[in-house]
Amino acid sequence: MASKIVVGYDGSTSARSALDFALNVARAQGGSIVVAHVLEWSPYSFLSAEELAERHKRRSEELERAEQALIKPLLKDMETSGVDVTAEVKYGNIAEVLVKIAKSENADLIVIGRTGHSALSSRLFGSVAGTLAQAAPVPVTIVP
Amino acid sequence: MGTFTKSATLAVPGLLAASGPLMAQSIDQQVNELFASSTGWFVNFIFSPFPGTSFPWIVAWLVIAATIFTLYFGLIQFRAFPHSIALVKGDYSDPNDAGEVSHFQALATALSGTVGLGNIAGVAVAVSIGGPGATFWMILAGLMGMASKFTECTLGVKYRNEYDDGTVSGGPMYYMTKGFAARGLPGGKFLAVMFAIFCILGAFGGGNMFQANQAHAQLTNVLGDYPGWITGIVFATIVFAVIVGGLKSIARVTEKVVPFMGVLYVLTALVILAMNADKIGWAFGQIFDGAFTGLGVAGGMVGALIQGFKRAAFSNEAGVGSAAIAHSAVRTKEPITEGFVSLLEPFIDTVVICTMTALVIIITGQLIADPETGLYLLNESGSAIQTVDGNSGVALTSAAFSSAFGWFRYVLAVAVILFAFSTMISWSYYGLKAWTFLFGEGKTTELIFKLIFCFFVVVGAAASLGPVIDFSDAAIFAMAVVNIVALYFLMPIVKAELNSYLARLKSGEIQKFQ
């Protein structure tokens, strides 16, 4: 069975652990991986008039930076892994976007790294893992 | 109008023991006299009445425009209202465009530029001069103004400039030049230059001096009297740090706190109304009676009407053209959607928030009426209604809210300062866009504008309310004169956009994403 795995990736060490875990699963099952990098964004945040005017420019810059600094080196790194790895860069709420990608790609598994936030900050700001546990359409693996 | 203002020049010893009250008084007075004498002619021209009447032509100009847009677009403000809400909620936003400016963000930013002292101090001025009846005309002007806003913001998006680096510049200057050229009409450039000049004056007036002035009035209300130029210098320094020093953190904090202050303000007003629920019927009675009889105010029904329309226009800026600058940053394939979203602005600003302020002032009994005749008593000069303790402007609103909750004066003081500040930041941007349209983009030209802007903060805080509010109104209405002329010529373009969009919405070509 060829499985498809969505990996939430932000360049941190735990995200890298999550990716390594997913690579092992994919190799064992002959599956593929979608690396998802999500830029945190809410359409209901408040911006000043100047920020509004510059938003499109900033967005292009942010996407470019993510592509150059994060995704390109990673994909190059993955060429030798023997697994088919693609990448997506999206804006939005991290958990919601991961769920959306899992649905649109017909994935079988979502893998994310543990953030290591305290219980308090997770409670205040919500955690990606917590939201995924409630909303994910497929099994979720959290890698420490 | 200056008569209902507490003079800001009675320095309190102790706050200013070292420099001396006398010197402070003379600085404030000199600023005031110089300012009043140099702007008087402009104010007189804008507010000159029709011959043989006391009805200013500018008020008729705004009302007629709003009526024409309302009729021309077939009561668009009511027809499109549900669709506007769906757009703001993001129902029609493509998820792949996430990260771009959303309809909600454009609306919130435009609102934080308009929700401000107009809603707090301006309304107090309207009901103290025009009586409760002014509220009726204010609400009517707010409802009609929705159509003006719809027209200008659609054009703002349609004819904005998009630069290679991805930034945008939009607003009346651009739809005047590009829209007129598209229709093959002459004079677009001339209108654009006129508009830009008035926009700069408006940025110095209503967007700056009026804000500084009322922020100072609110501070003296809480801290006791001290000279205005001190507030002015403090404010100017902070504004300078943000717009020249690029201290974005202050602007960002303000942008986030202002909406919460707005919500808190409305909620408090609702609580006060609930506490006086038995008087709400009476208050609306006063509003309706006053709207058609004046209930004894100077100028009668016409006086109430003029005040209502003036303050509504000043508060929601419909037809003025300023919002078109803020809204033009949205990236949308359909310019008309931004028009739909923007029509919520006068509704929230005037029909909801301004009405709350007026109701609280009326219900808490701030306006003194003759118990026998039911008519309102006028002050010594006969220009405004007598109020409890002789309050006016923001002090009147403060007194009304504090009569229910004593602590609210402090909340209001913070709110007024934040509103004033966010309005100044927004208008510094509008003014700058007009300035660069005239003089070209460039670090030096921009710096010159920003320095002049900061200078006027000090002037505004030091001058007394009368001349400042006159000049602010005059500059903002001068923008409306030019802008509305352009809107008349360009409204067929908006109509074509509207018909095309509504047809595609009906046929199902435009669909919700969620």
Image (cartoon, rainbow, N blue to C red):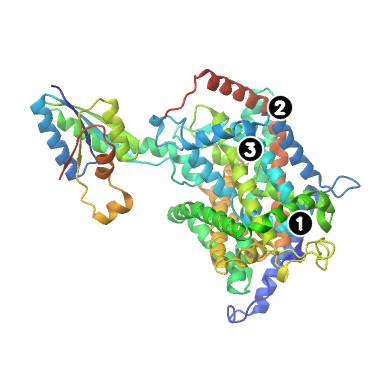
Provide residue B505's location: percent of width, then percent of height: 53, 22
From the viewer's perspective, tell me whether residue B432 is left or right of residue B48.
left
Read off the residue under disc 1.
B131
Could you say which is closer to the camera, residue B363 or residue B113? B363
Provide residue A27's location: percent of width, then percent of height: 9, 28
Query: Are the residues under marks 3 and 2 on the same chain?
Result: yes
Do the residues bearing badges 1 and 3 touch, measured as CB atoms within 8 Å? no
Provide the secondary structure element on which disc 1 rests: loop
Read off the residue under disc 3.
B149
Read off the residue under disc 2.
B186
Of the residues shown, which amino acid type is indicated by label 2?
Pro
Provide the secondary structure element on which disc 3 rests: helix
Could you say which is closer to the camera, residue B372 or residue B457? B372
Could you say which is closer to the camera, residue B402 or residue B93? B402
Residue at horizontal 47%, vertical 53%? Answer: B251
Q: In the rendered image of this protein, does residue B240 appear above or below residue B169? A: below
From the viewer's perspective, tell me whether residue B256 is left or right of residue A125.
right
Q: Earlier in the sequence, mark 2 or mark 1?
A: 1
Residue B338 visible to the viewer: no
From the viewer's perspective, tell me whether residue A127 is left or right of residue B136.
left
Of the residues shown, which amino acid type is indicated by label 3?
Lys
Query: Are the residues under marks 1 and 3 on the same chain?
Result: yes
Query: Are the residues under marks 2 and 1 on the same chain?
Result: yes
Q: Earlier in the sequence, mark 1 or mark 3?
A: 1
Instruction: Rate crowding at label 1 as few (under 14), some (14 to 19) or many (20 or more) other CA atoms within 10 Å.
Output: many
Name the chain letter of the residue that bears numbered label 2. Answer: B
Q: In the rendered image of this protein, does residue A100 appear above or below residue B309? A: above
